[in-house]
Amino acid sequence: MIKRCLILLLICLPLCLRAQFNMFAKEGEDLKKFTGALVMGLNFSQVDGDSYWGYHKVGLNAGAQVFIHFTPSIGISMELLYTRKGSRAATVTESPYVGTYIWKYYMDVNYVEVPIMLHYTEGKYDFELGASYARLINSNEYVITDQPVNIDAVGNRFNISDIDFTVGLTRHLYKNLLANIRYQYSLTSIRPPERIPIGYSYGNQGQFNNLFNLRLEYVF
């Protein structure tokens, strides 16, 4: 009987020790009801519906986070971010006017974004699921080609708001430093089909942000 109890204790002890660790609490301190974090990282973006593929647009993702802990495992967070999304494309092209040249397409859509996320924390990992609301600050779109392309700031404008589905995973790295990866996809179009420049659309559903975030978070 004693031997069985010792075996059971040896099996359960690592699980208990793991459960006591929480990535949002400093070593030796109890988990607080509220924690904050500074966030800095990069977006790797494409826009579905622009006829180009690949997460070639790299943009800043930075801001601050407030986390409410209901239990050591369950919580909710809200962030205020500056985030740069968009699209990039380039290809080597032959032209009867200039010969061989590199054709390029640029789309930048810059937002203030507020993600609201539900969290489940287990040991050194935190799983998150939620949505984000983004408000457009400014945008820029142009083409480098052998022929003029007319892109009108009003006629080809983007929607002022973007709502994204968001899912992510965070891992504790060292002391107060965490690493976070997220995937985001627009639930509503960022621009309807009728406002996309002629020849620069794919399908008839409009355009949608599609991106990954890689970020570092410093918890305090």
Image (cartoon, rainbow, N blue to C red):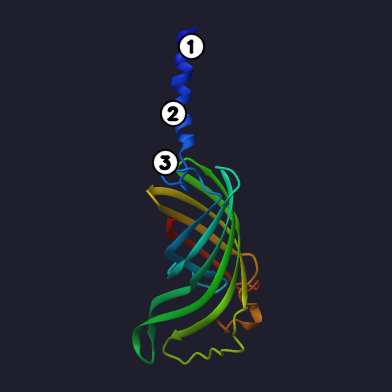
Of callouts 2 and 1, the N-terminal one: 1
Give the residue pinned by disc 1.
Answer: 4
Of callouts 1 and 3, the N-terminal one: 1
Seen at 56% across and 89% down, the residue is 153
Q: CA distance from mark 2 to mark 3?
A: 18 Å
Q: Is residue 191 left or right of residue 54?
A: right
- Residue placed most toward the observer, 105 or 29: 29
Mark 3 surroundings: few (<14), some (14-19) or many (≥20) residues within 10 A: few
Amino acid tagged 3? Gly
Q: Which mark is residue 14?
A: 2
Q: CA distance from mark 1 to mark 3?
A: 32 Å
Q: Position of residue 28 (x, y in %)?
A: 42, 41
Amino acid tagged 1? Arg
Which is in the foreground here, disc 2 or disc 3? 3
Q: In this picture, is 54 found above or below 220?
A: below
- Residue placed most toward the observer, 97 or 187: 187
Q: Position of residue 136 (x, y in %)?
A: 57, 77
Which is in the foreground here, disc 1 or disc 3? 3
Of callouts 2 and 3, the N-terminal one: 2
Q: CA distance from mark 2 to mark 1?
A: 17 Å
- Residue placed most toward the observer, 33 or 200: 33
Mark 2 surroundings: few (<14), some (14-19) or many (≥20) residues within 10 A: few
Give the residue pinned by disc 3.
Answer: 28
**CB of mark 2 within 8 Å of CB of mark 3?**
no
Seen at 49% across and 35% down, the residue is 19
Q: Which mark is residue 89?
A: none
Q: Position of residue 187 (x, y in %)?
A: 64, 65
User: Element type at marker 3?
Assistant: loop
